[in-house]
Structure formats: C-alpha cells, structure tokens
Image: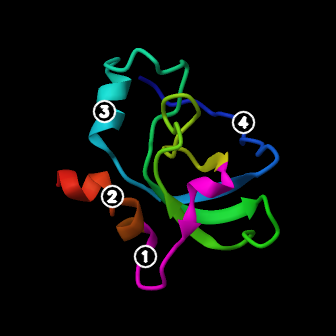
Amino acid sequence: MFLVEAPKPQPAEGEVLVEIMAAGINPSDVENVLGFFPYTTMPRIPGRDFAGIVRAGPADLIGRKVWGAGFGLGFTRDGAHAEFLSLPAAGCALLPEQLDFASAAACGVPYVTA
C-alpha cells in the first residue's frame, strides 16, 4: 500500500462531491485492502464511513454538512479515505447538529466494532 495523488472526483448527475472532514475505519476496510473481497475493483481508495461538507451537486445540498456509509464505497467506487468523495446524493444524510464530524464518521460500524 502507498500514498498517491488522485484527481478530484467529478460527480455525475444526481451525485454529490463531499469534502471529507473525518473518515472512520471499518473492519471491512481492513479486510478489503488485504484482498478478502474478490468483487472489489482495483485500484481503489478504501473507506466506507465518512462525514464532510458537500462542495458540488444538487443546489440544496451545497455547503451542507453530511455523513454516510456504504453505497459501494471502497469496493466498486473510491471511498472516504481521501480528501474528496463522489457518491449518489441518496448515499449521504444531513449531519445532526449535535454530532461533530469525527463522531459522525465513527458512529456506524466503527463504533459498534470498538
């Protein structure tokens, strides 16, 4: 494994571009980079759980704080262990006021695992 510069993703119609503020580490992220999921398309940026700010996409979401997990992230599309993430708008939800970015990114499977 190594660090590389990747181009900023370009969201397609119905997708959002999220600037990642925090990303969780899910057990499936670790298993995935170890090669345990044969359906993962490579090369691939891992990371399923995230929180961030929408920078492009539907006008009503731009600038909004969001969080989410899944939607093929890290398996069939690049995941959240990057500066930016592109995914379907339905793959993220508005961040509740009482959660900060780090708490939201760790709220799902990373929390249960811990």
Give x and y (percent) for residue 26. 32, 44
Per the image, the residue denoted by label 3 is 30
Residue at left offset 52%, top offset 40%: 79
Q: Earlier in the sequence, mark 3 or mark 2?
A: 3
Q: Residue 89: horizontal and vertical position, in percent?
A: 67, 56
Query: Relative to 105, is 72 on the left or the right?
Result: right
Label 1 to label 4, Cα distance in Å? 27 Å
Q: Secondary structure at mark 4?
A: loop
| Residue 104: quadrant of the picture | bottom left
Q: Earlier in the sequence, mark 3 or mark 4?
A: 4
How far apart are the alpha carbons under marks 3 and 2?
16 Å
Q: What's drawn in magenta, residue-wise?
A: 88-101
What residue is pinned by disc 4? 7
Q: Secondary structure at mark 2?
A: loop
* Depth check, front residue: 73 or 81: 73
Q: Residues within 10 Å of mark 1 (few under 14, many from 20)?
A: some
Give the residue pinned by disc 1: 100
Q: Point out which mark residue 108 bears.
A: 2
